Amino acid sequence: MASEQIGETVTCDDCLEEFEVSGPQTNQSVKRDDEAASQEPSAAASLDLAGDSDIDLLTLDDHWPPPSQDRTTADPKESPAGEELSEDYEFTAICPLCSTRQSVTHVQVGKNIKCPDCFSAFEIRTPPKHARRKRTSSLTDDDGAEFKLSDPIERPTYESSQTSASGLATEPPAAGPTGTGGHPTRAISPVSDVMRRAEQEFEEAERAAPKLPERPLTSGILSFLIDTNTLPRLVVLAVALQIEAAAVDAAFAGMSSAGLGKVASALLFMFFFVFGLVCFVAASNSMLAITQEAAGGNNRVETWPELNVTEWFYDSLYVFAALFVALLPGVVLGQVFILFGWLAYGLGLTAACIFSILVLSPILLVASLETGFPFNFASMPVFRSLTLATRHWLRFFLISLGLAVAAVVVWQLRYFETLLLNLLVSLVVVAITMTYFRVLGRLVGVCQEASRQQPD
């Protein structure tokens, strides 16, 4: 350290403390006159203060900087003069990186701690005696220097709201708000009040919900057909069915002709498939609406499907998937009749397909509607309903068989080739189809009630 740094503030390389450089401590005063220059200098004054030579720090006091120059803030709790603290003391440690101050104890000397600001670790060194002060905190090392748990308090004991009969006779009732007749009213918690209101609303909704008749599969089945919301759709679907039937008849008749007749026949077949697809989508959505309303116990259809092409095509997949999967067992079973000739094969295949559709398609349709996906038929509630409401399922199969026979018989009247009669036939066939889906909806309502009465 050069002599010209005396009086300036410098930083220690080890502890990063800032202090002011002062002259070295000597045992006798330095005389600045010419006579003192001829005298033998003392050991402490032998240093050249006028030149540029460095001052040897080893000659300074061991506790440099002196107490007057230390950066530790004066604290009234510091040890008084003459009292030396060798244990059970605390002092201030300064982070060498960010100069953050924190109080540490004597047990932390020689250990590494983390700065609470910059999180850098540094070693706690033994402090000078003048920087030590008595410990005022009663914390132990396990408790930590930053947190202290509150003293335990006495908690009130739990008293049950249910008292014994003797308690009712000896203890007076608690003071509180009084109700009718001067009797105290019991306070109701907000959660209990919400639950009670929810139960009341649920009970009121159940009482207000329409109930199925005593004979759900037969009582009031046809009344919805003359409703103002149903009748227009019935007429539109009947006209569409008549157009489809006329197109396919003309297409088959044109196949036997030559030239333009075959071209017209091909165009009619194309029209038959395209127009038939549109009619199937529209009819499927109408039939599903009838089924859902009947399952809820409604006597009339309140919510018909709104015009949405995307939703219509998706919802029609429920009916298409149920019919397609139900048809496969009939096709396989009908192959047996080929052993008895072509006539028997044709009649047997037709009968097997019709039987398979009548038995399997309603089960598959209801199962897919319950699962919410057209091709997912794994519905345990529907399969359970086959045992819980077996009698109603058997009655439904008999009714559906009668409706199918009636539709086939009425359809045969079309061959009289009278336009008005053919339109009437189409109207009756569409009405039979709507009735079938209404009975199916009533069956779904019966199965739902059976499942509620006998839960898992």
Image: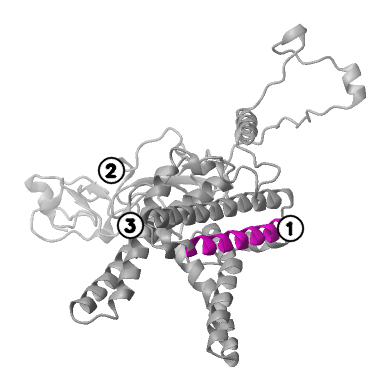
**Residue name at image x 33 percent, y 47 percent:** 100
Of callouts 2 and 1, which one flags the residue occurring earlier in the amino acid sequence?
2
Q: Which mark is residue 391?
A: 1
Q: Secondary structure at mark 2?
A: helix
Point out the stretch of residues depicted in magenta.
391-412
At label 3, the amino acid type is: Thr
At label 2, the amino acid type is: Gln
Is the stretch drawn in magenta largely helix, strand or loop? helix
Q: Which mark is residue 121?
A: none
Q: Secondary structure at mark 1?
A: helix
Marks 2,1: beta carbons within 8 A: no
Q: Which mark is residue 310?
A: 3
Residue labelled with disc 2: 69
**Residue name at image x 89 percent, y 22 percent:** 167
Q: Residue 361: percent from the left, percent from the top?
A: 55, 66
At label 1, the amino acid type is: Arg
Mark 3 to mark 2 CA distance (whole Å): 87 Å
Q: Relative to the observer, which residue lies in front, 388 or 217? A: 217
